[in-house]
Image (cartoon, grey):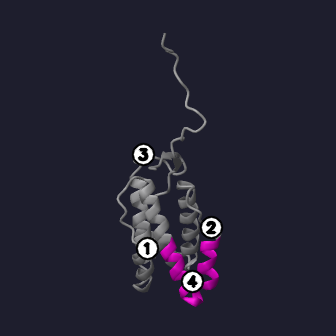
Amino acid sequence: MANTQPTEPGPNAAAPLSGLAMKRRGPVAVWLGLPIITLGIYQLVWYYKIHKELNEHDRRQDLSPAGSMLVLLFLSWTLIAPLISFHNTGKAIANAQRAAGLQVTCSPAASTWLAFVFGINVWYMQRELNRVTEAYPGAAPGTQVPLAA
């Protein structure tokens, strides 16, 4: 006689991946409006927040929000350190797009080199982050969302 009781997943069964939804922000406000009003301080706050949200969205990424922000704050005079940080942020955004099940449209190179064009890389990175938030319509920031494997 066959066993008709439902079976429970074993200890080796993979749990569905999930993370936290990120906040949608206006790219122009992040790039131009708020940094002008706050004399540049908002860009550091924004950079910290997006790294924290990227980390919470997909825990498989190992990001340091404070470290990333401190690179801009203390090492911007070197020029190389911020460019490396922008490149790594572009990679993290591309990984977030992949984790959301989207086609990857964020280019780490564009995230880096657009810094030389009036700092428009901030606008670009926020626009690409907004694509991830749009992948989860109706999800409030900080709520659980499913991730692609």
23 or 4, which lies in front? Answer: 4
- Determine which residue is flagged by label 4: 81
In the rendered structure, which amino acid carries the disc numbered 4?
Ala
What is the distance, in whole Å, between disc 1 and disc 3 at their CAs?
A: 28 Å
Secondary structure of the residue carrying numbered label 1: helix
Secondary structure of the residue carrying numbered label 3: loop
Mark found first going from the N terminus, 4 or 3? 4
What is the distance, in whole Å, between disc 4 and disc 2 at their CAs?
A: 15 Å
The image quadrant of residue 53 is bottom right
In the rendered structure, which amino acid carries the disc numbered 2?
Ser
Mark found first going from the N terminus, 4 or 2? 2
Over which residues does the magenta segment extend?
A: 67-88
- Determine which residue is flagged by label 1: 108
In the rendered structure, which amino acid carries the disc numbered 3?
Gly
97 or 134, which lies in front? Answer: 97
Spot occupied by residue 45 in the image (x, y as percentages of width and height): 58, 70
In the rendered structure, which amino acid carries the disc numbered 1?
Pro
Mark found first going from the N terminus, 2 or 1? 2
Q: Residues within 10 Å of mark 2 (few under 14, many from 20)?
A: few
- Determine which residue is flagged by label 3: 138
Secondary structure of the residue carrying numbered label 2: loop
Magenta segment, principal secondary structure? helix
What is the distance, in whole Å, between disc 4 and disc 3 at their CAs?
A: 37 Å
Whether residue 48 is visible, yes or no, is yes
Circle 4/circle 3 CB separation < 8 Å: no
Q: Is residue 124 left or right of residue 36?
A: left
The image quadrant of residue 85 is bottom right
24 or 65, which lies in front? Answer: 65
Indicate which label's residue lies in the foreground, 3 or 2: 2
- Determine which residue is flagged by label 2: 64
Spot occupied by residue 108 in the image (x, y as percentages of width and height): 43, 73
Circle 2/circle 1 CB separation < 8 Å: no
